[in-house]
Structure formats: C-alpha cells, structure tokens
C-alpha cells in the first residue's frame, strides 16, 4: 500500500525532485506542478530495486497562464528556468498548459479542447496511474486515480483518453523498463 507520505519519500529520494520542489516557487509561475515520470518512476524503481532516479530522462513542470498564449511568452519562462536551474544536471521541461491545444494535434494527431488548469494537463496522461503531480506552492499531491495502481504497477487506460491508440504503446514502453508492470487494456 502506498500513502501520500510514502509516495513523497520515493519522490524525494531523487535529489533533482527535491531541488525543483524547493526552488520552483521562486519563479512565480501560476498553477505550477511538478508532474509525470519524475514522480512515478521513483516508485517503480523502488519496487524494482533500481536507484531512485534510474531512467528519468526529464523533469516535467506544468504551469497555467492564459494571459499570453504566444510561444515567445512560454519561451521566456523556459529561458528563465534554464538560468535558475543551470546548476542542475537535468533536463527540465517547462510547459504552459494554457497553450497545449495549440500544438497537440500536430504532435499527437488529434485535437484537444483548451485546458483550464495544470491539473487538466495532468489528468490527460494516457496511463491512469501516471496522472500525478505535486503543486509546488502548496505541496498538495494531485492524483485523481489514487496511488494504489501506481504502487501495484497496474497500467490502465485513463478513462478520459481510453480510446487513444497510443495507450498501449506508452504502457509497453513502461513495461519494457519495468517488466513486472501489468497492462490492463480496459479501465
């Protein structure tokens, strides 16, 4: 069983996660969350006997600012963050969730409606147990599907994206790295 305290212990076993959670608030980004693989992979690494940060390729950071949807505004945030975190040996991916609908179809082959928050972005991940984020200002965990499937390694389609053919590809890529994971094709 995995509770929020246990989850945070695994997340904070990765020094880059600790640095980001401590230092992201200084950027003043609205509705800012650390999200995705840098949060769930340490749990699977623990269950697999791997080092906590094994396999983490980037550290996803979401914010939501609908006041300026231009690429230039987002890039200014990306450049500011690059300077702020230049001492970290990590790829920090910062994305304005208010802009996702502008590029999503080109990247993933289907349109999506504009998001209304960073939580909307987190809730759009293909695999339900990976829909997870930590609000950098409050420390609150947003895990709409709970933490038990994450701990148990059960990969189910996110009910919000259940018809997406990319689910199986994503789930198989996870299972290639953590063979004990179980794929369930139905939510």
Image (cartoon, helix red, strand yellow):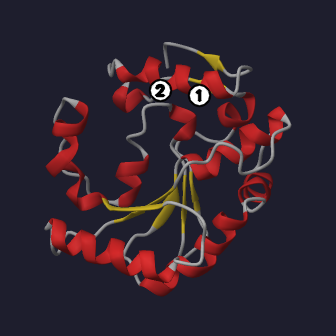
- Is residue 87 found left or right of 45 in the rendered image? left
Residue at the image point whose x is 62% and y is 51% from the top: 39
Vertical relation: 165 (above or below) 40: above
User: Which residue is the site of mark 2?
Assistant: 170
Q: Quadrant of the N terminus?
A: top right
Question: x, y (%) of residue 112?
Answer: 20, 39
- Where residue 123 appears, as percent x and y from the top left, is 42, 44
Is 29 situated above or below 108?
below
Is residue 178 depicted above or below 91 in this figure? above
Question: Would residue 48 appear left or right of 184 to someone viewing this image?
Answer: right
Residue, far top: 185
Q: Secondary structure at mark 2?
A: helix
> To which residue does mark 1 refer?
174
State left or right for residue 140 relative to residue 54: left
**What residue lies at 26% left-to-right and 70% top-to-bottom?**
75
- How many discs appear? 2
Q: Nearer the viewer, residue 150 or 57?
A: 57
Q: What x and y, as percent, mark residue 71?
A: 17, 65
The answer to whether residue 25 is above or below residue 20 is below
**Neighbour class for label 1 at 10 Å: few (<14), some, many (≥20)?**
many
Residues under labels 1 and 2: Cα distance? 6 Å
Find out whether the residues at labels 1 and 2 contact each other: C-beta distance under 8 Å: yes
In percent of width and height, residue 29 lies at 38, 77
């Amino acid at each position: 069983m995995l509770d929020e305290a246990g989850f945070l212990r695994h997340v904070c076993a990765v020094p880059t996660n600790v640095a980001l959670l401590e230092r992201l608030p200084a950027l003043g980004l609205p509705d800012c969350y650390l999200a995705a693989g840098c949060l769930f992979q340490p749990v699977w690494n623990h269950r697999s006997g791997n080092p906590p940060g094994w396999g983490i390729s980037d550290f996803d950071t979401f914010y939501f600012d609908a006041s300026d949807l231009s690429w230039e505004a987002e890039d200014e945030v990306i450049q500011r963050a690059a300077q702020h975190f230049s001492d970290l040996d990590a790829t920090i991916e910062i994305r304005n969730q208010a802009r996702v609908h502008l590029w999503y179809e080109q990247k993933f082959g289907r349109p999506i409606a504009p998001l209304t928050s960073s939580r909307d972005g987190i809730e759009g991940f293909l695999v339900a147990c990976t829909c997870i984020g930590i609000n950098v200002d409050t420390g609150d965990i947003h895990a709409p599907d709970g933490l038990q499937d994450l701990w148990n390694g059960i990969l189910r389609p996110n009910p919000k994206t259940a018809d997406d053919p990319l689910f199986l590809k994503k789930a198989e890529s996870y299972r290639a790295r953590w063979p004990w994971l179980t794929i369930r094709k139905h939510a």
